[in-house]
Amino acid sequence: MSVDRVFVDTNVVLSGVIYRGNEAEVLNHALLGHIRLVLAQAVIDEVRRVLKRRFPQDEPEFEEFLNRADYELIRYPDIADIHGASAMVRDPDDAPILASILLAKPDFALTGDKDLLTDEVRAIAPTCRCADYLREREEL
């Protein structure tokens, strides 16, 4: 069985670092090598901004995770990529994330953002919630 390439967005990383739920389980699977983690530079930058502003006590845990995890880094999307993605999402802040997903071409793109879980987005990107992904993995 091949290892899934799994993109995680900002809310998955934040929840996984700060709380102990499905998102933390996904990040742990990445640390254990059960999945091939795909991280976008846009996600890393956004996580750092949010942690610095709202959860500074969790910054060291995130940096430790980055140091320990083996992940594939996706470059920041260019303006044309972001512009194309912006037509698919309601919130302009989601466009760089969707553009990164489209650049990465992962097996799964995990998110809790309802704007990235629409039928329109799912038609072009393999987005799903962490709980759904973990449930599907259990069935394999």
Image: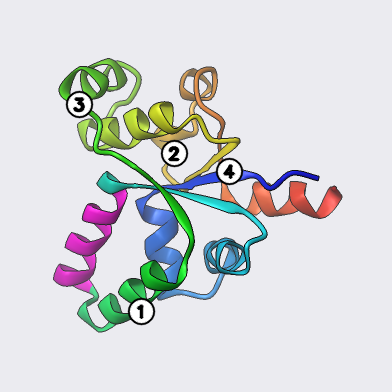
Query: Which stretch appears magenta?
Result: 43-54
User: Is disc 2 placed on a helix, strand or loop?
Assistant: helix
Q: Is residue 33 above or below residue 52?
A: above
Q: Residues within 10 Å of mark 3 (few under 14, many from 20)?
A: few
Distance between the alpha carbons at the discs numbered 3 and 2: 24 Å
- Residue occupying image coordinates x 26% and y 45%: 42
Q: Which residue is mark 1?
A: 61
Distance between the alpha carbons at the discs numbered 1 and 4: 23 Å
Distance between the alpha carbons at the discs numbered 4 and 3: 22 Å
Q: Residue furthest right?
A: 139
The amino acid marked with disc number 1 is Glu
Q: How many marks?
A: 4
Asked whether the residues under the numbered discs 1 and 4 touch, taking CB atoms below 8 Å apart as contact, a structural biologist would say: no
Asked whether the residues under the numbered discs 3 and 1 touch, taking CB atoms below 8 Å apart as contact, a structural biologist would say: no
Asked whether the residues under the numbered discs 3 and 2 touch, taking CB atoms below 8 Å apart as contact, a structural biologist would say: no
The amino acid marked with disc number 2 is Lys
User: Is disc 3 placed on a helix, strand or loop?
Assistant: loop
Q: Which residue is mark 2?
A: 114
Q: Is residue 107 above or below residue 57?
A: above
Q: Residues within 10 Å of mark 2 (few under 14, many from 20)?
A: few
Q: Which residue is mark 3?
A: 78
Q: Earlier in the sequence, mark 3 or mark 1?
A: 1
The amino acid marked with disc number 3 is Asp
